[in-house]
Amino acid sequence: MARMQRISRRGMMGGVAAGGAMMALGGSAWAAAPDLKAIRAEVDKRHDESVKRLQTWIRQPSIAAENRGMEEGCKLTMEMLKDAGFQTATRMPTDGQPGIFATLDAGAKRTVGMYFMYDVKQADPSEWMSPPFEANLVDKPGFGKVLIGRGATNQKGPEATFLAALHAIRGAGKKLPVNLVLVAEGEEEIGSPHFPQVVRKPEVLSALAKCGEVWMPFNSQDPDGSVTIDLGAKGIIECELVSTGARWGRGPTKDVHSSLKAELDSPAWRLVMALTTLVSADGNDPAIDGWYEHVKPLSDHDKAMIENAAAKQDEKQVMKQLGVQHWVKDLNFKDAMLRLASEPTVNIEGLVAGYTGPGGKTILPSRAVAKLDLRLVPDQTAADCLAKLKAHLAKRGFGDIEVNMTGGYDPTQTAEDSSLIKAEQAVYRRHGIEPLMQPRLAGSWPGYIFTGAPVSKPGGHFGLGHGSGAHAPNEYFVIESSNPKVEGMAGAAMSYVEFLYQLAAMK
């Protein structure tokens, strides 16, 4: 997921033990007092099969960027959904990788929407302590038994844990307290370029119209047990800027000897020059013409939320985890967090030209590529910002540089007083956790498709449990926790059980 992994915060656990909190009926009332003891017994009984289900999923690579295992990944996901009780799970063709539309009719009064992704990021096995697609269980100091594998935390771990919750409810002889409408995609990790083709099918829109909200499973706990609720997420444009001698009409149309630079132009230097126009001299502020035209400022309430969160975090610990010594522009911690939520960004993900292997090769490259991601805030849109980027380059004489958008979408925002956010708060508080509130996640997910027209529903993430390493080597998900402040897979599954009952109770 194109999200930012949460950084550890100071402990926010209250005096209610997690196990006792499962039976507590404080906070908002349940739709009906559920027998959580019976469901928890089923979670424990089915623990090994739940872990095996996750291992099976991770052992099936599904990498959209490499077109690897996608049909197999889609088929396996549909099988898992049906096995968990969904009456329908339909493959939804797109112009790219297929999506999935699934429904579970429990005869309940309330219907809830869900989002899944079945694709994962690429992985270089040489960088991992355990092979990324073997899904091995290892002991991790400070955490307990964890599963290491690509997709462990992003997003197969939380999703498989939710499926474990469905199996446990049914195994305990209980009916699901809500109906479910689920849409899944196989292109989240490449910017969800074809997800609208799934969601905007008439039958999918009709089903989502019956939902009160749309959410995705998420292991939200930091190592200290704390949780943050984000009321939105930044949007994103992922694109490549390509400079070539052939398109420019200057410089070589194929790689030539570097001695010829004295008489030839360089497409690589041209790309560098174009890139410098996109940002301020220090590289930290977007300088694209009109970029801030639709940027919505933070409200006083937004600022208060961020300032409260900053005051309750350990700045030195955050810096240590990030491996940094300074915030941008040497800002203080509070102002850096305000900037994190409020500012759009222009980032170079990768920059490639010519020979990059061992030693030198003394060539003048005919082609240079910059991979960019541009994070967007309300009320920017991906379409408008892409047009501004192209116009900016053309105005400065760089119209020959190709701008190829590979994926992206608009920002997302959900009201703090929505049923979704209130339900999340109620369950977290029942566990003795007072969640930190943030106006938006600095990372991105395609929630705009749900929070924007025509669906227009609250959207977000929920779940206890912990994992880390998304997009990085040694990605992990906590299976059996040795940290009393953090739930393992069983506790995370029970948080989903509670959440479904809580949603059923919302007005």
Image (cartoon, rainbow, N blue to C red):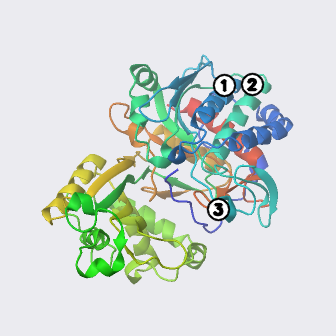
First in sequence, mark 2 or 1: give its number: 2
Query: What kind of element bears circle 1?
Result: loop
Question: Cα distance, mark 2 to mark 1?
Answer: 8 Å
As drawn, is 340 to the left or to the right of 135? left
Q: Residue at x 69, y 44 (%)?
A: 58
Q: Between residues 7 and 203, which one lies in front from this camera angle?
A: 203
Neighbours of disc 1 within 10 Å: few (<14), some (14-19), many (20+): many
As drawn, is 283 to the left or to the right of 137? left
Question: Which residue type does callout 3 highlight?
Answer: Pro
Q: Which residue is mark 1?
A: 176
Task: State yes or no: discs 3 and 1 in contact (Cβ < 8 Å).
Answer: no
Q: Between residues 346 and 297, which one lies in front from this camera angle?
A: 346
Question: Where in the figure is residue 249, as x and y percent of width and height?
Answer: 19, 62
Question: Where in the figure is residue 80, as x and y percent of width and height?
Answer: 68, 30
Q: Nearer the viewer, mark 3 or mark 1?
A: 3
Could you say which disc has been placed on residue 473 in the image? 3
Q: Which residue is mark 2?
A: 170
Question: Where in the figure is residue 430, as x and y percent of width and height?
Answer: 66, 47
Q: Eyeballing the image, is 470 above or below 452?
A: below
